[in-house]
Amino acid sequence: MTKSLRLPPVFQPITYRAFQAGADRVVNAIRPTLGPLPRIVALQRPLDGRGPELLDSGGVIAKRIIQLPDYRADVGAMFVRDMLWRLQEQEGDGTATAAVLFQATFNEGVRMVSAGLNARLLQGYLEEGIQVIIGELRRQTRPVAGPAALTQVAYTVCRDSELSELLGEIFDIIGDYGRLEIREGAGRTLQREYVEGIYWERGLFSQQMIADWTRVRSELEEAAIVFSDLRVHQPQELLPVLITAVQAGYRRLLLIADELSDSALSLLLANNKPEHMQILAVKTPGYGQEQQADFLKDAAVLCGGRPFLRSAGDRFTSIRPEDFGHARRVWADLRNFGVVGGRGDPRALRSHVASLRKLHAETTDLVLRGKLQERISRLLGGSATLRVGGVNVREIEERKALAERTAAAVRGALQEGVAPGGGAALLACRPALQRCLDAAGEPEQRAAYRILCHALSAPLRTIAANAGREPAGILAELQKAGPQHAFDVLEGCLVATSTGALNDPANVIKAAAYAGLSSAALALTIDVLVHRTEQPSHALPPAPGKRKQL
Amino acid sequence: MSLTAVTIATHLILTDLQSIHALAASPTFAQDGLCCAAGAAGLRLSCDGGRSWRDAYASLALTSPLTTTAVAFSPDFVHDRTLFAGVPGGVLRSHDAGATWHVAALSSPPPFVTTLALSPHYVEDGLLFAGAMEDGVFRSWDRGASWAAWNFGLLDLAVYALVISPDFAHDETLYVGVESGVFRSSNGGRTWRETAFPMECGPVLSLAISPNFAADGTIFAGTEAHGLWMSTDRGVTWRAVTGWETPGPINVLILAPTYPRQPSILAVTDAALCLSHDGGASWQVQRSAELTGVTCAVAPSDLQPGAQILLGTNDGCVLLCMV
């Protein structure tokens, strides 16, 4: 036995009971938050001694549950927590749906396995059934457009009218790949602004390059741009740039370099005379050579010209007039610089953006996906900033986190469409499962489809119960009305799904269904629990994983 | 096929504009005969259907000619007497049929305005758009008093043509023809999306949208060197118009006001007038020395036989033609 295994392993039949107890603890804590009329979960804050934290987000609640006292149940709790945390990070929402789907599937599965079915076979058939569900959800998906529809999607996530309306407007403008920065604001309200062109978070090398001290920034019109990640130590290294610029008649120059020595900077400042030549110098955006190379590639496509790469052994000695990029306008301050109207080849830019979009759609790596999203959004030429205010720091932080989650969900809805919400889309998958059940022969196969048919009604039941309504009656009503209907718990009546009044982001529904059901299927195959004492890793977020293409 | 279908009238009017960039006719041209010609040397107004012209910028007392690159009348001109003129770096507006002018600057560096388009519901929404050669699309919400660039998603800022859906109040759709094809906005110009127009077939110099766009979703695009294209699904997919055989850049496209009931299309290249009465399946082409260098055109009424067309050339002439 290794040093870390101080507690005895847990075997069947205790494994299922212990796992179930832990998972139920987490799911039952999150369950009340599902639906448009959620209950609040109060979490004590032992560390700062202040009042309890009032939460209605399943993902946040899951993050706050660090450890259960019973080490056997803790494994189940952490299994569910990890699944929900990942879902929250990926899609921004859907954790409560995933939690109840997990619980319904796992508990019913345990019953079946306990009755003698093979867990591994059952898992395999559950996975088959999950693919049927994903296919059915995909069939129900339709595109979303317009500020009103986007506001409605945002509202289903955040239930904050002011925030929903602003996000609806913003995403209507910036589109599915557009750039949105959510920042803490100074006032008490939400404010948004739109920025023309593209900007990066890297500022001027010297404040002596600031020309307009009222706005603390400099602007160059019809600027020539040198893109590089070179480290310039000697002023002589810059002379070819200045000489070539002068010879080519470029009177306004933006130099992008990774480093400039004091003497090199002095040379630029000495030559920065508006009557002869205006020069701005900013640091190459990005951390590390890979990010900087991405920036240089994007910028060169956007503005034309040739990037000078350290890794390729480039030097400015070989610079030619055609190596300069050009833009209608560039600006820089001490923290950022931007380009408006890059003069690259528009066809090359469109092809480049299309290839990045294709990569973004195909990749399953979440980190790469995030980077690609950022690169695409920059190249689309415009960004929005949402400033989140509040009465105190905590409120601002919480509302900012809510805005970030909601923005992720709305972006997902724009990219992948919407499907009927309120559990209706999941419920509408049942006829397809029933057909599979009718055709099934193996006991495990029949059990798998039965489990899934039952589990798919769990979100609707929970939503209704949380709203103080009788789930069985609503299910009967929906069954009678047919699959094109959903139940609006706020109004207490059935509505046609074609009205779009109860839409949820399709990516969230699909991801929640996949995460909850697939995790439960996997959990059914767990036979032994081994407890390790190195617990602090539980407090850390899960490593960014892969995003399943659904 | 090259049949003579367009008769050039004897009226060839020399203006002092050096070259004509844009022509526009009042919505009530049949009654008032009012039209404008914008060119390198300014803006000229005619109150007799183009037969005589006067300087529209007389009240500005300019010391040097003010190049004017675009001009547009308000759809409610008969009441508001408003017209707009695109000049380097700004848009001029007049609320008294060109007697006096107000200036609204666009962002610096000065954009070259290539096209101006007013919302069909301008009276209610006060919305108008300006396309610029290197700066994309500018949008004004306040009847031209202030302007802002709105280029989210517009990956190509070289705008040559801009058309607005006749059903703009409902679909908020507009299209721009750019260097690399056609972009579409379905939210009133706030965001732009690429269409499937093939990039290699750009630039798109002219666009024409069906008056019955809400029902037929038809839009035509004239290119510089790759002929005439059309879409019948609101710009989602495009196909080349097979009957088009005339070489040269298509500078102007005009559809009959009753299209598709009367499926007439007028296409103007830099050397020919081309008219189709069957939605582009076959064309009747008119070539003549006078038609060389035509840059712009306007059909104030319709494309029925006998209808009048005004053409502007790059040597400052206005041709009055009859279909």
Image (cartoon, grey):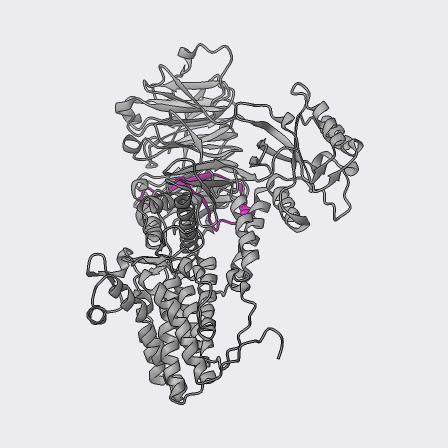
Residue at the spot 35% in from the left edge and 67% down from the top edge = A28
Marker count (numbered)? 0
Residue B193: in magenta span:
yes
Pick the residue in front: A238 or B116: A238
Pick the residue in front: A113 or A394: A394
For residue A503, side relative to residue A211 (left or right): left
Residue B203: in magenta span:
yes
Percent from the top left, x then y, of residue A449?
Answer: 36, 80
Residue at the spot 50% in from the left edge and 20% down from the top edge = B67
Q: Quadrant of the C terminus of chain B?
A: top left
Kindly indicate the quadrant of the structure image that contains residue A201. top right
**A343 is higher (above) or lower (below) than A52:** above
Question: Magenta part of the protein: which range?
Answer: B189-213
**A146 is higher (above) or lower (below) than A111:** above
Residue at the spot 29% in from the left edge and 65% down from the top edge = A424
Residue A171 at least partly seen: no
Kindly indicate the quadrant of the structure image that contains residue A504. bottom left
